[in-house]
Image (cartoon, rainbow, N blue to C red):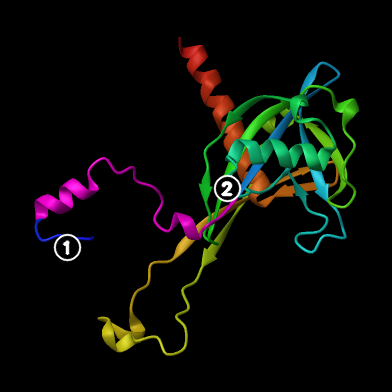
């Protein structure tokens, strides 16, 4: 039978050892993506997909392989599974999986990115229902070329009936607004932007950080 908590000591004991998470974690949609590294003519390239024009969401946009994390599935497993399904390769063909920083978006989603190596691009046979085409870009291109950056401003719009009378300032309340950077890369007529460009930029920054540390030692 449940007994009520009546003092601070009981509260402390009840919560001790708890591992914190993201508030509202269970309500977030969770996705995993893979930044695939491949070798082309003895040079490291990044592989991209172009989403099929028949898809309902974001048709024709450049992206990395990825999708929704299924129940009971780890983010890394989801990234590998989605890459295997979309590129028509075996999961064992995806190697050296490295977790990158995960992102909590303003739209109620958590994205878990990974970098990994596809050992044989000749085995790639894209799923035409999801992938219109694949292409690669030399990693050196992104190291030499900074993305164009633009600001997106999020505006607060309370719903009809919002109780302005309960807050100081009422309808003139000074809401905190949020600004987000959007990155754009252009390569041979392809535009890489949005989540894909964010993950890519993060990866390039990690590479630069590692290089600078190595040079400093």
Residue 132 lies, in percent from the top left, at 88, 49
Distance of mark 2 from mark 1, alpha carbons? 38 Å
Residue 108 lies, in percent from the top left, at 53, 60
Name the residue located 47 percent from the left edge and 56 percent from the top edge: 26
Residue 178 lies, in percent from the top left, at 46, 62
Local SS, label 2: strand
Local SS, label 1: loop
Residue 28 lies, in percent from the top left, at 52, 58
Name the residue located 52 percent from the left edge and 47 percent from the top edge: 103
What residue occupies the far front of the structure in this picture?
1
Report the side of 18 relative to 183 (left or right): left
Looking at the image, can residue 207 be seen?
yes
Residue at label 1?
4
Return the residue nearer the eye: 73 or 21.
73
Q: Earlier in the sequence, mark 2 or mark 1?
A: 1
Q: Which quarter of the picture shows residue 58?
A: bottom right
Q: Magenta part of the protein: which range?
A: 8-30
Q: Is residue 140 magenta?
A: no
Q: Is residue 19 magenta?
A: yes
Residue at label 2?
111
- What is the crowding at mark 1: few (fewer than 14 residues within 10 Å), some, or many (at least 20)? few
Looking at the image, can residue 48 be seen?
no
- What is the crowding at mark 2: few (fewer than 14 residues within 10 Å), some, or many (at least 20)? many
Query: Where is the N terminus found, in terms of image quarters?
Result: bottom left
Return the residue nearer the eye: 128 or 90.
90
Query: Where is the C terminus found, in terms of image quarters?
Result: top left
Nearer the camera: disc 2 or disc 1 = 1
What residue occupies the far top of the structure in this picture?
217
Name the residue located 78 percent from the left edge and 53 percent from the top edge: 61
């Amino acid at each position: 039978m449940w007994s009520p908590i009546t003092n601070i000591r009981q509260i402390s004991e009840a919560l001790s050892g708890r591992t914190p998470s993201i508030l509202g974690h269970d309500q977030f949609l969770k996705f995993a993506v893979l930044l695939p590294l491949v070798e082309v003519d003895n040079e490291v390239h990044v592989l991209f997909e172009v989403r099929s024009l028949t898809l309902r969401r974001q048709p024709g946009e450049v992206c990395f392989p990825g999708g929704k994390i299924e129940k009971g599935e780890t983010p890394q497993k989801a990234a590998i599974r989605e890459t295997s399904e979309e590129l028509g390769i075996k999961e064992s063909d995806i190697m050296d999986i490295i977790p990158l920083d995960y992102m909590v978006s303003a739209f109620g989603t958590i994205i878990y990115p990974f970098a990994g190596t596809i050992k044989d691009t000749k085995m790639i046979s894209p799923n035409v229902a999801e992938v219109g085409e694949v292409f690669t870009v030399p990693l050196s291109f992104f190291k030499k070329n900074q993305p164009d950056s633009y600001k997106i401003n999020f505006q607060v719009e309370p719903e009809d009936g919002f109780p302005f009378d309960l807050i100081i300032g009422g309808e003139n309340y000074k809401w905190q607004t949020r600004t987000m950077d959007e990155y754009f890369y252009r390569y041979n007529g392809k535009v890489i932007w949005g989540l894909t460009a964010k993950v890519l930029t993060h990866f390039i920054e990690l590479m630069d950080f590692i290089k600078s540390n190595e040079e400093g030692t």
